[in-house]
Image (cartoon, rainbow, N blue to C red):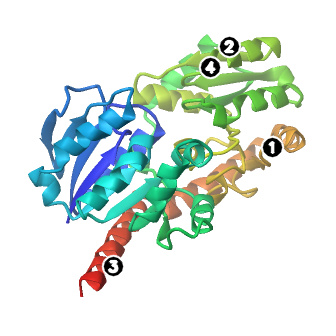
Amino acid sequence: MKISWFTENYPPNRGGMSRSCDRIIANLRKHHTVDIYHFTNKFEPFFSEANIGGLYTAIPMYEDSSHSLNLLWAFIKDNAEIAQSDVFVGFGSHLCIKGIPLMATWLKKPLLSCFRGNDFDTAIFSQKKQSLLFAIENSNAIACVSREKVERIKRLNLNRNVFYTPNSIDASQWEVLKSDRELAGKLKKDLALKNTTVIGIIGFLKQKKGVDFFISCLKKSRLASNVHLRIVGEIEPHLETLLIQKDIAYTICVPGAHTQLTANYLLCDAVAIPSIYDGMPNVIFEAAILNIPIIASNAGGIPDILDETNAFVFKVLSEASLIETLDEYASTPSEKRLEKSFFLKEKVLSEFSPEIETKNYLDIFKNITHQIKIVQS
């Protein structure tokens, strides 16, 4: 099978969706040819190169999304590689939602639309809603990263072929090295964190991540007097202002390498994921593999993995629930925290492996192919 995969989220772009896209494509290329059409300005327009398992082509992006999509259409409508494609995939993002369902229709190609988190959550309540609804109705299948998204899309009664395709993690890429532990120890010493509870907040901290809500509740919890927030990633200026106002100790870093990211995880006594709405954060899997306890809301796809047996979970936007959960974490003996982490790691390894993730996608492609054969007969 030859797959044409369209996305705005692929390396060298950073972020969870890019890492997920890279992982999924790399594993699918072990079974099928996957040609990537990447909306990006990090390369010359329409730069193309052969990869193992398929082509990579850079599609230029402009402020005017309609112009970007018209350029893509001009590029692919008579393209030989596209003509040989068996299926299109639109992997999240506004450009894919707006353009790929139409182009798949014009070129008579079956379409799998993948919704991760913010792509659906933002579009469904915005002026982009009609594009999203058209994409749902005109896709041969929908892949969702959380059960919550599956149910919400099914209830729109626009498409019956909606599938749960959760994230995964390759544990072999997160083996802790001696250098990782040494760097974590050095960081802890340099930051004078020996007798301090270090809570990590990791990733691209958008509004949906609920960081301001977490900071305000943390100040009212038992942890407030002896806590340090280690913010690993980009942060909005108003959050720094809030941290200063609440008098909460913090440091910020942006890791430049995998070993720096791993060391920052190891620096933490716990990782917080206080999302208001979300897909399935990669931070859950990374913290789980490294045996770091997690304090998280029950937003989006988070309950597909976390519960009271393997994490410290609170109700979305409930100040009382979050403060109670923070206090519960503070009063839980370290061996009990590690027990929760052990249960979570076992669950992630057994239920969220790359092999399972890949099979989910392969089953969908098989389902699409079966549908086409029925129609053609």
Tag 1: residue type?
Pro
Q: Position of residue 195 (x, y in %)?
A: 75, 22
Report which residue position mark 4 lands on.
Answer: 236
Tag 2: residue type?
Ala
Query: Could you say which quadrant of the image residue 325 lies in?
Result: top right
Q: Looking at the image, is mark 3 or mark 2 earlier in the sequence?
A: 2
Report which residue position mark 3 lands on.
Answer: 371
Q: Nearer the viewer, mark 4 or mark 2?
A: 4
Tag 3: residue type?
Gln
Query: Could you say which quadrant of the image residue 110 lies in?
Result: bottom left
Report which residue position mark 1 lands on.
Answer: 333
Q: Residue at x 17, y 54 (%)?
A: 82
Alpha-carbon neighbours of circle 2 within 10 Å: few (<14), some, or many (≥20)? few
Alpha-carbon neighbours of circle 3 within 10 Å: few (<14), some, or many (≥20)? few
Q: Position of residue 59 (x, y in %)?
A: 25, 36
Query: Could you say which quadrant of the image residue 74 lies in?
Result: top left
Question: Regarding mark 1 in the picture, which secondary structure is present there?
Answer: loop
> Residue 192, which numbered label?
2
Q: Can you see residue 286?
A: no
Question: Regarding mark 4 in the picture, which secondary structure is present there?
Answer: loop
Q: Residue at x 86, y 45 (%)?
A: 321
Question: Regarding mark 2 in the picture, which secondary structure is present there?
Answer: loop
Alpha-carbon neighbours of circle 4 within 10 Å: few (<14), some, or many (≥20)? few
> Residue 272, which numbered label?
none
Q: Nearer the viewer, mark 3 or mark 2?
A: 3
Tell me: residue 354, above or below residue 322. below
